[in-house]
Image: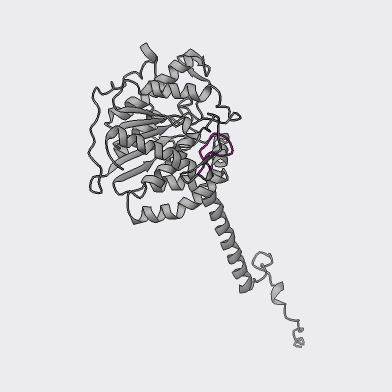
Amino acid sequence: MVPERRAPSARPPRHPSRRRAPGGRRRAPYVAPEGRTLAAGRALLVSLAAFGIWLALDARQLYTSAGASPLGARRSVALAILTPIARVQEFFGLDRVVDGANRALGGRAGVTPGVIALPPATAGHGGGRAKGAASPPTTANSFLQPSAAHPLSVLDVGDSIGIDLGYGLQDLLGTTRSVELQSASVGNTGLANPAYYDWPANLSVELARYHPQVVVALFGGNDWQPFIAEGRRADPGSSFWLQQYTARLRQMVDLVTASGAHLFWVGLPIMSPSSGLAGSVAPSLNAAFAAACSGNPNASYVSIYNLFASPTGSYAQFLPDASGNLVEVRDADGVHIAPPAGDDRAAAAVVRAIESTLHIHL
C-alpha cells in the first residue's frame, strides 16, 4: 500500500528585512539614496570647515612659502589670496598660538632634514668667531642699480619679529620688478637654542638655495635665556653669556658675508614694560648685534629702536602715520610689530638703509 503523500504546508513569505546573510547574521538595513546624499554633503561641509581652520591657522607659513616661490603668475595669485588671510591671522595672534603649540608639543618647525650642524661657536679674543669660520672680507661689495633684467636678490631671515619685518618688506618690495624677495624667517627660533632650530646650518642651506645679494636679519625675541656653552651655564646678562652670544652672531655674519652677500642686521624695537624684554634687555641685545657687524665692510647694523618710541622716548603702541593719523604699530603683546602700519614702518627704515649703503634705488 502506497503511503499517502501530504501536500506541503503553506508558509508565509519572509519579510525582506528578516532575511539573514550567510552565517546567520542579519543584513544591515538598506539606506536610501537620500541618506547617502546627506552624508556626503555633511562630509563635504566638515572637510571645508577643516580646510578653513587649517588655512586660518597656517596662513603665515603658507604666505612665507609663497613669497619664497619663483616669480610668476602663480606666486602673484598665491600672495594676493594669502596676504589678507595672513594679516587677519597675525592681527588676532593665531600664528603665535600655532607656534606655541608646536613648541609645547616638542615640534621643531622648519628644521631642514639632512643638514649637518656647523661646529659650535667658541670664544676668542674680542668675543671670538666660530671655529673654522671664514674671515670677513676686507673690501665692500659693489652693487649695480637693480633693474627688471637684473633684479636685486634679497633674503629675509629671523624669528617671528623677523616675519613681521618680512611682511613689511613684501608690502614695499613685493611688486617691484627690480627686486626678488625671499622670506625664510621661522617663528619661535633664535640663536640661544640651536637644539630647537639650528640657524647656522639652515642659513647655509638658504644661502646656497637663493644666492642672495642682500640678507636682512632680525632676531632676538627669543634669545634672552640661559644656554650651555663650553660645558658651562651662560646666564643672560652675564659677561660669559654676552661673549658666547656675540660669537654666535659673528658666525652668522661670517656665513652671510663669505657668501658674497651684504648683511643688514636689524635691531630690536623698543619693548613694552610688560614684555620681559624692556629695560636694558633689548638695548643689550642690540649692542651685541652692532658689535657683531663692526669691522666687516659687508655687514651693516640698522637700528629701529627709537622708530617705535613716543616723542618722550617711551614705548608706544600707536603712532601717527604720514598723514598725522594715529595707527597701531605694535601688537598687544608689546613685542611684535603690528600690521600693516608697523611692519611697513620698520621695512621703510630697512629699505632706506639698503639704498644709502649700497648706493642704489629700489
Q: Residue 149, position in %: x, y? A: 23, 48
Q: Residue 147, position in %: x, y? A: 25, 46
Residue at image position (28%, 36%) is 213
**Image quarter of the C terminus:** top left
Coloration mode:
one colour
Residue 230, located in which quarter of the rendered image?
top left
Left or right: 167 with respect to 358? right
Left or right: 175 with respect to 142? right
Mostly what secondary structure, the magenta segment? loop
Q: How many marks?
A: 0
Residue at image position (45%, 30%) is 219
Q: Does the magenta stretch include residue 181?
A: no
Determine whether 182 is above or below 225 in the image: below
Residue 274 appears in the picture as rendered: yes
- Observer-nearest residue: 199 or 151? 151
Q: Residue 115, position in %: x, y? A: 38, 32
- Observer-nearest residue: 358 or 151? 358
Determine whether 156 is above or below 14 in the image: above
Give the magenta part as a residue range.
327-339
**Image quarter of the N terminus:** bottom right
Q: Residue 351, position in %: x, y? A: 36, 38
Left or right: 341 with respect to 116? right
